[in-house]
Image (cartoon, grey):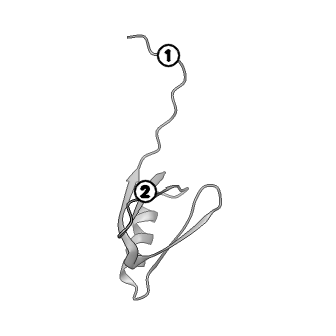
Amino acid sequence: MEIFIGIRDNTRQLALDVDMSESELVSKVNEALVSANGLLDLTDSKGQRLLVPARALGYVQIASKTERRVGFAIG
């Protein structure tokens, strides 16, 4: 699943491809936001680890992964 994380006071967003379900991701985000010194800890499909302080989270956008099309369209 592809996700985009917006960071407060920053114009760029972080894009990640994670191997987890939507409910697992929502649970991790909620857990980070509720804890006192919350830290969103994610690992992408390439094995890269991302740590984001919960106080810096602007938004988390969840996008379903779209398959790449091959060929030409005739229209």
- The three-letter code of the residue at mark 1 reads Phe
| Residue at 43% from the left image edge and 87% from the top image edge | 37
- Decide which of tag 1 and tag 2 comes sooner along the chain: 2
* Residue sticking out furthest to the top: 74
The label on residue 14 is none
Residue at the image point whose x is 38% and y is 71% from the top: 57
For badge 2, the amino acid type reads Phe
Query: Pointer 2: residues within 10 angstroms few (<14), some, or many (20+)?
Result: some
Is label 2 in a helix, a strand or a loop? strand
50 sits to left or right of 73: right
* Figure quadrant of residue 27: bottom left
- Image coordinates of residue 25 in percent, x first then y, are 44, 64
Q: Residue furthest right?
A: 47
How many residues crowd around disc 1 within 10 Å: few (fewer than 14), some, or many (20 or more)? few
Left or right: 69 as drawn, with respect to 5: right
Tell me how far mark 1 sits from mark 2, CA to CA: 29 Å
Placement of the C terminus among the 4 image quadrants:
top left
Compared to 26, does 68 lie above or below?
above
* Residue found at x 46% / y 64%: 24
Front residue (pair 53, 47):
53
The residue shown at (58%, 59%) is: 44
